[in-house]
Amino acid sequence: MAVRYSYLSQQFADCPELWEELKAFVKTGDFTLGKPLYEFEDNFSFLIGTQYAIGVNSGTDAIKIALRALGVSAGDEVITAANTFVATVGAIAEIGAVPVFIDVDETFCMDVDLIEEAITPKTKAIVPVHFTGYMTKMDKVNEIARRYKLFVVEDACQSILAEWKGKGAGTWGDAAAFSLHPLKNLNVWSDGGVIVTNNSELDKKIRLLRNHGLIGRDHVELLGYNSRLDTFQAIVANWLMPQAMDISQKRILNARKLDDGLGKIPQIKIPARTSEMRIVYHLYIIFAEKRDELLKYCLNKGIEAKVHYPIPIYKQKAMGDKYNSMKFPITDIQAQNIISFPCDQHLTDSQIDEIIDSVKEFYLQ
Ligand SMILES: *Cc1c(COP(=O)(O)O)cnc(C)c1O
């Protein structure tokens, strides 16, 4: 592959200090809820700018446990975006709650003007998804949530260090979920997730829920989950954490170069870029005419482009036919026209040029 999608084989290829730390850690045997996990939680809450951070098994569990800690339960409705990764919806469904989709806007995130009409007496929470490095217009979400007394759990899994109006992803809601999955912007070597909050009661409840509801060894306060962030992975995260800002900055620079080159091609439309939003480009998504042919052309040339996502979650078989009659026109149009290119911190300038040149060539042929 001339321009590969995944950079994981490069990212940790040369990190002798990290291996030394891991070797030293293995000798301590402090594997479960070990000291490096608590260090990671301090580091992470500092990075995001919240009071508390709690490491869990995955981003999916982070959404699920945050909702459950807020008291969302079976039959409650949770409003979320029609264009998201399955995990958001899976997490809501796992606690027996009902996902209620609303359409997205030009930022790929939920259209905040559609929230109010989706609220019913059963609505308990809103889960805005900060999609692909963008951010939901959180001032509006919070204003509505306050008025209707709804909880807000941000799905910030794709948008660590993104900002809306100068305030970071994860700092707006009652709680927020992050993912440390290998393909996310701040990644470890396995599954992992983090919940952040400024609410001390919520922090305590989430800590109980992630560890079987146990207080000490012998007292079970409530029935929870086995969902602790692996201490070994917390060491990897601690090692990577000082690079977090640089990683997002490099992605922003790469996106700017791609915008400059691709934006000159008439058949390509660059999505909304607003100065009010710090977009961290989990993926680099643009709109392309003849998308499917372009995708094929790029793949043939060794450029590993993708589509996120070709079939919106509400249309997936797993959702049954409940949502079939509903209309999410923007989500549908985006699904038909978007294409994603790599934009990560390991991408070189010549790879960026190769992407731009190949797209140009495709439309000239
Ligand atoms: C990755 C992701 C999740 C879940 O993260 P995992 O750590 O893989 O469980 C949730 N929501 C969105 C939008 C994601 O992209």
Image (spheres, rainbow, N blue to C red):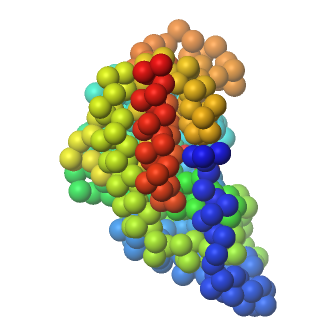
Q: Residue at x 55, y 20 (%)?
A: 293
Where residue 322 appears, x then y in whole percent? 60, 16
Residue 219 position (above or below residue 299): below
Residue 303 position (above or below residue 310): below
Seen in the image, is 196 located left or right of residue 65? left
Q: Residue at x 62, y 51 (%)?
A: 6
Residue in the foreground of this view, choosing between 334 and 42: 334
Q: Quadrant of residue 197?
A: bottom left
Residue 228 position (above or below residue 22): above
Seen in the image, is 142 located left or right of residue 296? left
Q: Residue at x 52, y 60 (%)?
A: 346
Residue in the foreground of this view, choosing between 21 and 298: 298
Where residue 192 appears, x then y in whole percent? 63, 61
Question: Do we see residue 22 in this rendering?
Answer: yes
Q: Quadrant of residue 253?
A: bottom left
Where residue 156 appears, x then y in whole percent? 46, 51
Question: Do we see residue 343 in this rendering?
Answer: no
Q: Quadrant of residue 193?
A: bottom right
Residue in the foreground of this view, choosing between 147 and 170: 170
